[in-house]
Amino acid sequence: MSATLKRQKELLGFVHFEHTENVLDTVKPTRLLRQMLHLATTDSSGDIVLDFFAGSGSTGHAVLAQNADDGGNRRFVLVQLPEPLPISEPTLHTIADITKERVRRVIQKLDSEDTGKLDLKGGARPDQGFRVFRLAESNLKPWDAEASKDASELAEQLELHIDHIRDGRSAEDILYELLLKSGFQLTTPVERKTLAGKIVYSVAGGALVICLEGTLTLDLIRAIADMKPERVVCLDEGFAGNDQLKANAVQTFRTKGVTSFKTV
């Protein structure tokens, strides 16, 4: 076993190296990747490094380590299919699990090494967090235009769309789908706020406000309008069939200069 492979397995916390020799036997060398980053990127350009075959996450490791070394602000995008592992580790079931776990552990290691160090450069500490997204079908059930127009089947489909959010989907799942459908990138800054006792999400410095509450109130509508966003998106179920509240929301947002108000 090479020294590089052993170090990477130790970082991941594998107890039995022999169980993973056929899983991580072709890992990318982190030192070589860092040398490539040194030659092809600069520390202040905000370059994005893309790896469509992330494997154990060596590329993300290299980017984080190189940023820590030279104070760079490089970012990375790692893509990995959830291929099952032929091992029985408690929390690692797919190669994608290895990718995520390695990045987490690298960040923890770098954070622990930074603890207690003096900031001689006077700069802000870089953000070493990361987000994980999984490709899946829409969180919103689509209307089946090919369904039978029989009265009973049509009534059943209408019944299903009273609550058109798929089971098991979180507010964060819906939030990021709406971000993409609204033309924003996944890296767009999102701030969670509490208005009138409800949670709203302010996107891109308030350009877009998304409210995923199941019950809306006039006080909440007014509080959102006072933020003067360009666009507002709410769940249609939040109005609970209250047409008067929805009409008031339309008028209130229009008065405050909101150019687009939509419900989903």
Image (spheres, grey):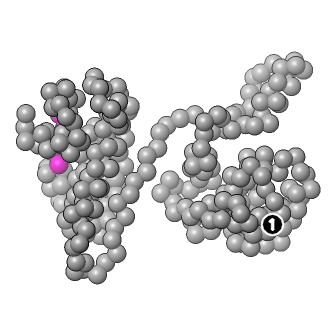
Residue 254 x/y as whole percent: 82, 67
Q: Residue at x 29, y 70 (%)?
A: 44
Residue 22 x/y as whole percent: 19, 26
Q: Residue at x 14, y 44 (%)?
A: 7
Q: Residue at x 69, y 38 (%)?
A: 165
Q: Quadrant of the N terminus?
A: top left
Q: Main secondary structure of the magenta part?
A: loop
Residue 232, picture quadrant: bottom right
Quick check: can you spot residue 253?
no
In magenta, the rendered stretch is 26-30
Residue 199 x/y as whole percent: 66, 59
Quick check: can you spot residue 106?
yes
> In the rendered image, which residue does mark 1 sit on?
219
Q: Residues within 10 Å of mark 1 (few under 14, many from 20)?
A: few
Q: Is residue 227 above or below residue 9?
A: below
Q: Is residue 38 above or below residue 240?
A: below
Residue 140, picture quadrant: top right
Horizontally, residue 56 falls left or right of residue 260, namely left
